[in-house]
Amino acid sequence: MKKIIFLLIHTLLFAAVPDQDLKRYQERYSLCHGKTNYQITQCLLNGSINYHRLRGDRNRYRQASKEAFREAERNGDVYRYVMSLMPHTRRYQGLKEYLDYLYTLREIYTPPRFRGNKEEDIIRIKRVLNLLQDARLREDTEITVWFEEAVIEFQRRHGLEVDGVIGPQTKRELQRSLHSIITKVKKNLELERIASPKGPEYILINIPEFKLYYYINHRPVLDMKVIVGKPSMRTPLLNRRMQYIVKNPRWYVPPSIYAKEYAHKSMSYLKRNGFALNGQGKLYQKKGPDNALGLVKFLFPNRYNVYMHDTPAKSLFHKRVRAFSHGCIRLEKPMELLNLLGYEYDTHENERIALPKQIPVYVEYHTVWVDEEGIVQFRNDIYGYERKLFR
């Protein structure tokens, strides 16, 4: 008897004709292709994500309550129930509104082609700038100061070289079809839907932006540039709690890095650069300003052995694309973070501090988002996840 009841419930959940409002929501705001209300809901909650191409933690699978779902179906209230499960954050709502706006442009959006007709290209560039960032340019062939300023703003919003020159990378972004922009936004809406809910205080690192934000009472109190892992040694996506600070850390060289970069070095080279061997024969770099970890590191224990730290290579923060590390996250302003956590750099000795209040750290991947000023930002898919992750 129990088996029959289970089969009946299964049939109701997985064979029902989908609610039309829910189906429209799926088509408009997601990459999901669910055929029933329950399939649509589960895909919206968990994303159409192919995790085997990801370096990082798989998001915990969220199971919609079957009991609540049955009740909603009986009451004809499925759409409202599912909407109560969606994020209500400013970032998510902002991206939804932006996507709604993009749909209104389908008949009038004409990107430049860059095939030799410069006058036509200028008119089309102005059309793109007017539609995507409300530039209010006259759509003619005249090159004005306002046109140049609008190009600079476009470059800034897309993480490009901000020089006002319409070079190859700026051309590539200007040439994007409206369909590809819509798809990019949909992918980021999926990432927002499956992102971990955040409390009033946390640290967010967005890998494609190469930026860190520290939020207190839901407001950013500190932001800084970061350096993340190169594409061959990707910084993992994860959510952990910062538990320790280490002042004047030693750097114990991981075996993989040792084999690639230090095994062939002479002992005289290693000594000149502050390296030594411990009692177990493991290579480490002594504490000090020339140490690869700088003067302080911030630990949020994880299986990838990734953490945040200072760096002596300050010049790299002037680069636009900052993917140079072995996977750890190098900080532009580590002392400001240290101070905000309530500590000073007041010793030249190695010191490990256990934080009395552990701070959530979210390492995420967003190539489109709405910033604190309400401006939609775009970035390059540095690790190729837009191609690799979505089914």
Image (cartoon, grey):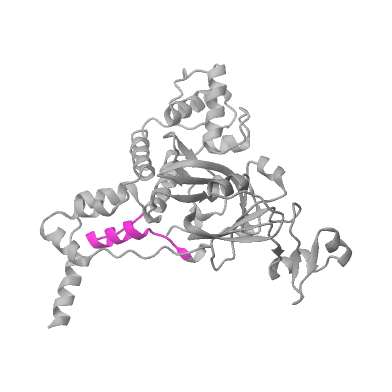
In the rendered view, does 50 fall on the left or right side of 87? right
- Decide which of 199, 349 is in the foreground and name it: 349
Residue 370 seen in the figure: yes
Residue at the extreme right: 268
- Decide which of 240, 74 is in the foreground and name it: 240
User: Residue 145, how many percent across, how many down?
Assistant: 57, 17
Task: Tell me which corner region of the image, top left, top right, bottom left or bottom right, holds residue 303.
Answer: bottom right
Residue at the extreme bottom: 1
Residue numbers of the magenta segment: 31-51
Placement of 374 over or under 254, stated as above or below: above
In the rendered view, does 87 fall on the left or right side of 2? right
User: Residue 15, how many percent across, how many down?
Assistant: 20, 66
Residue at the extreme front: 346
**Residue at screen point 32% across, 56% down:** 44
Locate the N terminus and report the quarter of the image it occupies: bottom left
User: Residue 245, how many percent across, how many down?
Assistant: 59, 58
Residue 237 seen in the figure: no
In the rendered view, does 371 fall on the left or right side of 25? right
- Decide which of 388, 296 is in the foreground and name it: 296
**Circle count:** 0
User: Residue 139, how many percent across, how many down?
Assistant: 47, 20
- Residue 90: in magenta span: no
- Decide which of 231, 294 is in the foreground and name it: 294
